[in-house]
Image (cartoon, rainbow, N blue to C red):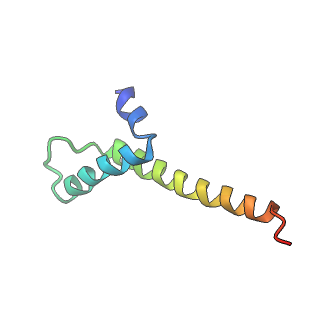
Amino acid sequence: AWYEYAVRVNPMENFVLGRYDAVALADPSASLWQPALFVFGVGVLAAWATGAVAVGYWRFQRSDLD
C-alpha cells in the first residue's frame, strides 16, 4: 500500500494517475477508485504548485534587478 502513495509524490505520475481518478469520480463503481489516494494526490499536486510559486517568489525578491 505504501508504494501507491510513494508513486504519487512524483507530480507527473500523480497527474497521469489523477486523470484516471477523475474518471472514476464520475463512476464510483469503478474498481480502481480509491478516495484516500485521490485526496493524497490532490494534496501533493497542490503542494508542488504552491511550493514552486513560493520558491520563485522568494528568489525574485532576493534578486538584484539593477
Quarter of the image holding residue 27? bottom left
The location of residue 36, given as percent across then percent down, is 36, 42
The location of residue 56, given as percent across then percent down, is 66, 60
Establish if 57 lies above or below 32. below
Numbered-mark total: 0
Q: Residue at (80%, 62%) from the top-left corner?
A: 63
Q: Residue at (46%, 52%) from the top-left corner?
A: 45
Q: Residue furthest front?
A: 66
Q: Residue at (79%, 65%) from the top-left corner?
A: 61
Asked if residue 47 lies left or right of residue 16, the reply is: right
Asked if residue 28 lies left or right of residue 35, the reply is: left
Q: Residue at (13%, 49%) from the top-left corner?
A: 29
Quadrant assignment for the N terminus: top left
The location of residue 46, given as percent across then percent down, is 50, 55
Asked if residue 32 lies left or right of residue 59, the reply is: left
Quadrant assignment for the C terminus: bottom right
Establish if 17 lies above or below 3. below
Establish if 33 lies above or below 4. below
The location of residue 19, given as percent across then percent down, is 27, 54
Q: Pick the residue in front: 58 or 33.
A: 58
Asked if residue 30 lies left or right of residue 17, the reply is: left
